[in-house]
Image (cartoon, rainbow, N blue to C red):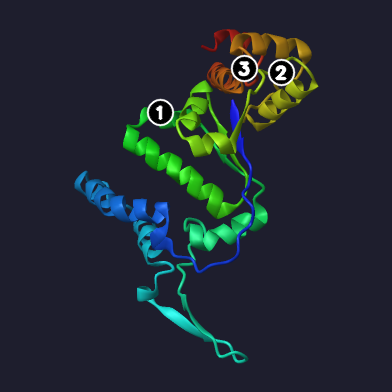
């Protein structure tokens, strides 16, 4: 199942105030304790990871440095806070590039939100709303039927997401193309003749038509192929794969 949320309408620009965002508040609240626990367990965060978090918490905050910008025509002044330039992690620095380049944001295994307690579930669902408003691109949540139950627990998100049932794979040209991609990506010394309709029917029967089970089956067969010296996925290695 996939759930798609439409992008909200663009809004006028306002100065970014990271301390008011849910993501910032979550990081500010939990990062110090998380870092302390990791260190206590003998696995302290790598320096580059700690710097990402620490610079993110300083990004966009006037108390950590700013420029004063003055218009020569109207003499209006405004303060521009320094940014952390951590575009790989910081939403403030990376959001513009994401908006310009990304068509949508996919959140996989959305059903796992139900594994958390009520507080964690609420924080995660609030984060989804924040991402939708901040990125202004469609969000796609992928998961089992429980993913829809998670979204339905929030009235606002339920109105934003439209559920779509994903069909199981069928033995056709698209499936053969998928199998050919799998065969090309596996580091085997001999070609694997799996991109045929007959093999597609056999593989889909064993995997129940789901791509996850199909990938697991092909990976298991590839391991058998290497260990047995067959060096190809065929009926023999597939029959030996668990």
The residues tagged by marks 3 and 2 sit, at their Cα atoms, a distance apart of: 15 Å
Q: Is residue 76 left or right of residue 59?
A: right
Secondary structure beneath disc 2? loop
Furthest toward the right, the residue is 173
Residue 170 at x, y percent in the picture:
72, 15
- Residue receiving disc 1: 114
The residues tagged by marks 2 and 1 sit, at their Cα atoms, a distance apart of: 37 Å
Tell me, yes or no, whether the two marked residues, 2 and 1, touch with CB atoms within 8 Å: no
Secondary structure beneath disc 1? helix
- Kindly indicate the quadrant of the structure image that contains residue 76: bottom right
- Residue receiving disc 2: 194
Q: Earlier in the sequence, mark 3 or mark 2?
A: 2
Q: Earlier in the sequence, mark 2 or mark 1?
A: 1
Which numbered tag is attached to residue 230?
3
**Front position in the image: 194 or 142:** 142
Q: Is residue 171 left or right of residue 123?
A: right
Q: Is residue 93 left or right of residue 25?
A: right
Question: Depth-wise, is mark 2 or mark 1 nearer the camera?
Answer: 1
Identity of the residue drawn at 43% across and 62% down:
18
Question: Depth-wise, is mark 3 or mark 2 nearer the camera?
Answer: 2
**Front position in the image: 34 or 119:** 119
In the depicted structure, whether residue 208 falls above or below residue 138: above
């Amino acid at each position: 199942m996939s759930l798609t949320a439409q992008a909200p309408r663009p809004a006028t620009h306002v100065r970014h105030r990271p301390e008011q965002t849910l993501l910032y508040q979550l990081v500010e609240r939990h990062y110090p304790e998380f870092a302390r626990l990791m260190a206590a367990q003998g696995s302290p965060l790598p320096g580059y990871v700690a710097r990402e978090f620490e610079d993110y918490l300083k990004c966009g905050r006037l108390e950590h440095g700013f420029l004063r910008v003055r218009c020569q025509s109207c003499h209006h002044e405004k303060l521009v806070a320094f940014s952390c330039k951590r575009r790989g992690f910081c939403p403030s620095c990376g959001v513009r590039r994401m908006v310009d380049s990304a068509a949508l944001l996919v959140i996989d295994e959305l059903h796992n939100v139900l594994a958390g307690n009520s507080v964690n579930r609420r924080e995660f669902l609030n984060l989804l709303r924040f991402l939708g408003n901040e990125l202004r691109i469609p969000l796609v949540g992928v998961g089992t039927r429980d993913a829809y139950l998670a979204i339905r627990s929030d009235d606002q998100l339920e109105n934003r997401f439209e559920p779509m049932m994903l069909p199981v794979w069928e033995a056709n040209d698209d499936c053969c193309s998928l199998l050919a991609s799998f065969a090309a990506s596996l580091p085997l010394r001999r070609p694997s003749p799996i991109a045929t309709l007959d093999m597609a029917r056999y593989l889909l029967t064993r995997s129940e038509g789901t791509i996850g089970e199909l990938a697991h089956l092909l990976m298991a067969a590839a391991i058998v192929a290497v260990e047995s010296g067959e060096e190809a996925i065929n009926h023999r290695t597939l029959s030996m794969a668990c």
